[in-house]
Amino acid sequence: AGAVVVAVGGLFTWLYTGADIAAAGTARFERELAVPPLAPSTVEADGTRVFRLRMQEGETEFLASRKTPTWGFNGSYLGPTLRAARGEKVRVDVSNTLPEASTVHWHGMHLPAEADGGPHQTVAPGGTWSPQWTVDQPAATLWYHPHPHGATETHVQRGLAGLFLLDDDRTPAGLPHRYGVDDVPVIVQDVRFDGARLDHGHQIMRNVGFLGDRTMVNGTLDPYFTVRDELVRLRVLNASTARVYTFGFDDDRQFTHIATDGGLLEAPSATTRLRLSPGERAEIVVRMAPGGRTVLRSYPLDAGLDFWNQRFGGGDDTFDILQLRAADTLRPSQPLPDALVRNTLPDGKDSVRERSFDLDLSGINGRKMDMGRVDGTVVRGTAETWTVRNDDGMPHNFHVHEVQFRILDVNGQPPPPHLRGPKDTVFVPSGTTVRLAMRFDGPADPDTPYMYHCHLLYHEDEGMMGQFVVVEPGQQPSPRIPSSPGA
Ligand code: C2O
Ligand code: CU
């Protein structure tokens, strides 16, 4: 009877988890980490920096001599790293050579709604779209990805994602900053192969969406990176569609957390673990010894999270992500500064309005996304406090377009150090309430909404999304938001 119980228990575990991800210690680290190229740009007479992104189909050789059909920007998988400085005017000429309409959203960017690249700014097959804006926010690791309503998960999984780095003149000079050398993108995705093809299928009862059985960094399987400096800065993006990672190193070494989604922390923060849900970013600095090796891993979610969060959040495993291999001699790095930047985000005291958002797979506040419905109207220049609650029994997170927010509290407690910087996405496991303070500084546009949503992309596609418009005081949003097809 014992064996039957164990077998039935095993079956249930399988139904909930599907095949497990390859266990830690089994990775071979046989491929050098690819680093996305910096995107070339041109500068027009009026100073506008212009990038070109082409969404295209292609084939990628992830596995030796097997060609996998993929999508990418300016290449077959992922996209180049865009980079611009605070104060610069930028324009991106986006062309779509895919067989389907898509969009390109600048995740974390403060910009006019018409340039946001949400589900209303569709780029038809064969079409182009040229959003422009002035970069007006602190240095940060942002990213871009498609956002077509109902199809975001598959468009991202096929390979459409890239980084958008912002620079400013407040960043302390001592931080590692040589791109691809001591300042390295780490775009983490989980995947599953079916022969040469990527298998995007959801597993039975896995209501979080897709969970893969192995990970890639920057599109490289089993990657290693050769470190040539004492300190290496990793710009980590969770570009997975549902999986939550709790990063740490296999030797449990301390590393230094320096930046959250929207920019630097006030001071470096030493830690051994850092959790990122889909869409979140963190910049960390790792100290290496000459000839040393260490492996970036993901560990199970906090013990404080219950079975359902663990299982549905894909966070019950320990697995390897990236090996760092130090050269036998390392260039000396400057010591990290004690202070980084001053946090100027609103603290909730001048909030003019409170709103609350109840997260559920059946919708936010009981409503599924409707492209023609405005769920909230915000007055330009004001600050608000948003309370986000999850009692759904499965993990969610919450992303707000246009703004960076300050996390005021998590279940009534002050946020832990790694949630004290500028954020645009926050993990909200079941049983959690977070309060967020944000200010809406952008231009008013009563006709064009911004989005807020769960960034588990299957949930977003299923309708865990809502829309808000920013208006001038006294102004009303347009009653029906037109869904504007692109050129
Ligand atoms: Cu990264 Cu609305 O998305
Ligand atoms: Cu969700």
Image (cartoon, rainbow, N blue to C red):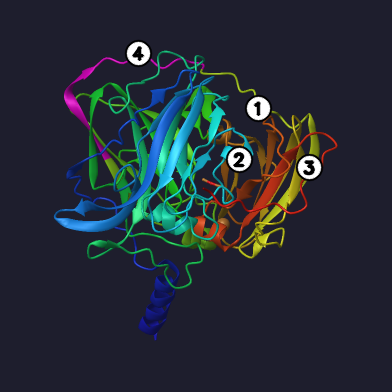
Magenta-colored stretch includes residue 226: no
Q: Nearer the viewer, mark 2 or mark 1?
A: 2
The kind of secondary structure element at disc 2 is: helix
Mark 3 = which residue?
354
Mark 1 = which residue?
345
Name the side, left or right, on which 367 lies relative to 18. right
Cα separation between marks 2 and 3: 26 Å
Crowd rating for badge 3 (residues with CA inside 10 Å; few <14, some 14–19, many 20+): some
Please state which amino acid type lies under the numbered disc 4: Gln
Q: Position of residue 362 (x, y in %)?
A: 64, 65
Mark 2 = which residue?
114
- In primary-sequence order, the first of circles 3 and 1 is 1
- In primary-sequence order, the first of circles 1 and 4 is 4
Cα separation between marks 4 and 2: 42 Å
Q: Nearer the viewer, mark 1 or mark 4?
A: 1
Cα separation between marks 3 and 4: 44 Å
- In primary-sequence order, the first of circles 2 and 1 is 2
Q: Are marks 3 and 4 in contact (CB under 8 Å)?
A: no
Count of numbered badges drawn on the protein? 4
Give above or below for 329 relative to 4. above
Question: What stretch of residues is rendered in magenta?
Answer: 323-339
Which residue is located at x 23 percent, y 39 percent?
224
Mark 4 = which residue?
334
